[in-house]
Image: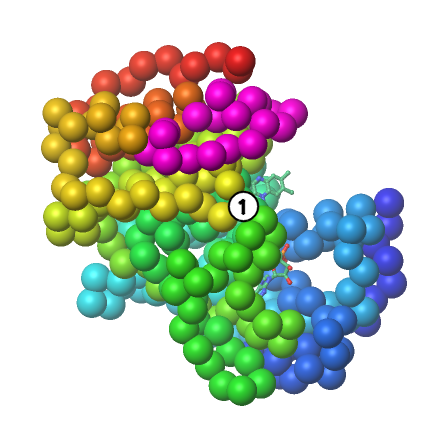
Amino acid sequence: MKCPPFEYHRATSVDDAVAALVAADDEGKILAGGQSLVPVLALRLARPAALVDVNRVPGLDELAVRDGVLRAGALVRHAALAGQTLHPLAAAAARYIGHAAIRSRGTVAGSLAHADPAAELPAVLRACDGAVHVAGPDGSRRVSADTLFRGALQTDLGDHEVITAVELPRPDAWGFAEFARRHGDFAVVSVAAARFGDRVRVVVGGVAGVPHLVTADAVDPGDVEGVAAAVADDVDPASDLHGSAAYRRALTRELTRRALGDLTGAASPAPVPEPA
Ligand SMILES: Cc1cc2nc3c(=O)[nH]c(=O)nc-3n(C[C@H](O)[C@H](O)[C@H](O)COP(=O)(O)OP(=O)(O)OC[C@H]3O[C@@H](n4cnc5c(N)ncnc54)[C@H](O)[C@@H]3O)c2cc1C
């Protein structure tokens, strides 16, 4: 289907984008890579009156580490994140996003604002205890990952707010594992694990409306199986056409085992369980 009609505004700055959203009342949407928004429009699942294109806004493609934190501008594409070496966990996760064409257009901020519960970057943001910087009519604010995600496709962002940058602290050790039915599909379940000092944050995607966080004391190689079992016990997935709740729980256990295996250096690959 074709998209419903909309006004198009090409923003020249963040302030201009915010002003255009305000002018559109509550009927405006930011257009970034378009890899989620355009299919939503084509399927007529949303009918925004105005699209505010931020692709030409200068200064939103920074990718740099300062004080152990990767700062990625809103327009950093998945492909750029996948190709960088400053934050290996983010790079590893970004390589699982869709296909090359999607990674070349889709943006870091777009993925976080869209907040698909199965998407890789929301899980990484939460595993790293990261945050987004947001500009709006009342100025700018910093929104932590724990606050940003409210539910499936729901965030704390206001209708007139624009994500300008993403902060991802660099973990001391990390692991990432996911299972999708076909190459390039959204994950059925994904697990991002990050160690900061003696604390480990394990985040499971695809088992709830928001990335599910479990924290643990430092995991040593001998504890991996036990922690993976505890994480699987902690999730409460629903059944859907991609897999039963029991299958998602089994995937959570195996993928956590793999991610923690990488994090602790105890990796021992085993087959991913078959669908129940
Ligand atoms: C076939 C296919 C397979 C895919 N597979 C995966 C996958 O495996 N994993 C995965 O994570 N994703 C996947 N995606 C989605 C892809 O990653 C998108 O790029 C991403 O979800 C949205 O980023 P975008 O830049 O394209 O945003 P857009 O589509 O332009 O926008 C998405 C939403 O975010 C809002 N938005 C965008 N930028 C901002 C901003 N700066 N501030 C505030 N709001 C903003 C928009 O208004 C809109 O509501 C897939 C997409 C397709 C089409």
Q: Residue at x 47, y 62 (%)?
A: 148
Please tell me which residue lies in front, 122 or 80.
122
Verify whether residue 238 appears in magenta.
Answer: yes
Asked whether, in this view, residue 48 is left or right of residue 121, the answer is right
On the image, the x and y values in percent for residue 204 come to: 40, 39
Instruction: Write down the region rendered in magenta.
Output: 231-249
Task: Examine the image and state in which quarter residue 93 appears.
Answer: top left
Q: Residue at x 55, y 68 (%)?
A: 157
Q: Residue at x 64, y 49 (%)?
A: 35
Q: Residue at x 35, y 25 (%)?
A: 253
Q: Quadrant of the N terminus?
A: top right
Name the residue carrying label 1: 209
Question: Is 268 above or below relative to 125?
Answer: above
Asked whether, in this view, residue 226 is left or right of residue 113, the answer is left
Q: Residue furthest bottom?
A: 138
Disc 1 under 8 Å from ligand 1? The reply is no
Please tell me which residue lies in front, 12 or 165.
165
Colour scheme employed for the rendering of this structure: rainbow
**Residue type highlighted by circle 1:** Gly
Asked whether, in this view, residue 110 is left or right of residue 68, the answer is right
Please rate how many residues cluster around mark 1, counting C-alpha atoms within 10 Å: few if below 14, some from 14 to 19, many from 20: some
On the image, the x and y values in percent for residue 194 come to: 26, 45
